[in-house]
Image (cartoon, grey):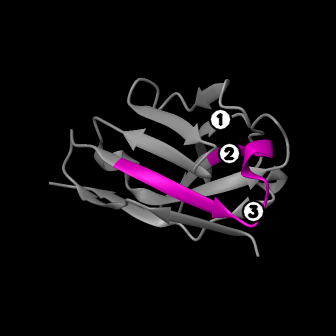
């Protein structure tokens, strides 16, 4: 049974940090590229950051460049999103997603598996 379980969300103050984790099971993690998406109320789901299957290639949205870092540990079947300098506009449900491709596509429909999401709220 495939599972992607996100954790680490919560309430943070503007300028603060959070680290999201996504633990994967039920598929060959090291053969799947992984991405973090987010969706705020009333908005479309947007790609935040992606990482290739081997971890050698990463990409991120312009809105989070220099603030968020995606990484993965294939030995632990886990992908991370380190979020620094948080802003109120980062408030959203954050999802991890897995694709059998080696690189991360931008289109959500290209992903095979999704987690249930974790809420990130940035507010003073």
Q: Magenta part of the protein: which range?
A: 19-35
Judge the density around disc 1: few (<14), some (14-19), many (≥20) Cα neighbours within 10 Å: many
Instruction: Tell me which corner region of the image, top left, top right, bottom left or bottom right, holds residue 124.
Output: bottom left
Query: First in sequence: mark 2 or mark 1?
Result: 2
Q: Residue furthest left?
A: 124
Q: Residue 35, how many percent across, how many down? A: 64, 45
Q: What's the residue at 63%, 37% (across, down)? A: 50
Estimate how packed mark 2 is, as few (under 14), some (14 to 19) or many (20 or more) residues with alpha carbons within 10 Å: many
Image mark for residue 113: 3
Q: Is residue 27 visible?
A: yes
Residue 86, located in which quarter of the rendered image? top left
Which residue carries the number 2 mark?
A: 34
Contact between marks 2 and 1 (CB within 8 A): the answer is yes
Q: Secondary structure at mark 3?
A: strand
Q: Nearer the viewer, residue 62 or 50?
A: 50
Q: Quadrant of residue 55?
A: top right
- Label 3 and label 1: CA atoms lie apart by 15 Å
Q: Earlier in the sequence, mark 3 or mark 2?
A: 2
**Dot 3 and dot 2 residues touching (CB under 8 Å):** no
Mark drawn on residue 51: 1
Task: Tell me if residue 13 comes above or below residue 70 in the rendering.
Answer: below
Closest to the observer: 94 or 113? 113
Crowd class of label 3 (few under 14; some 14 to 19; many from 20; radius 10 Å): some
Label 2 to label 1: alpha-carbon separation: 5 Å
Q: Is 4 left or right of 113, judged from the image as shown?
A: left
Was residue 72 drawn as part of the magenta stretch in this picture? Answer: no
Q: Which sits earlier in the primary sequence, circle 3 or circle 1?
A: 1
Q: Nearer the viewer, residue 74 or 90?
A: 74
Q: Secondary structure at mark 1?
A: strand
């Amino acid at each position: 049974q495939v599972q992607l379980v996100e954790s680490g969300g919560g309430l943070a103050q503007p300028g603060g940090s959070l680290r999201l984790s996504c633990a994967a099971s039920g598929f060959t993690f090291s053969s799947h590229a992984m991405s973090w998406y987010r969706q705020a109320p009333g908005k479309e789901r947007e790609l935040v950051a992606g990482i290739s299957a081997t971890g050698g290639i990463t990409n991120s949205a312009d809105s989070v460049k220099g603030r968020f870092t995606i990484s993965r540990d294939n030995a632990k079947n886990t992908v991370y999103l380190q979020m620094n300098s948080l802003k109120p506009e980062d408030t959203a449900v954050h999802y991890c997603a897995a694709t059998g491709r080696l690189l991360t596509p931008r289109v959500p429909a290209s992903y095979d598996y999704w987690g249930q999401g974790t809420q990130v709220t940035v507010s003073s």
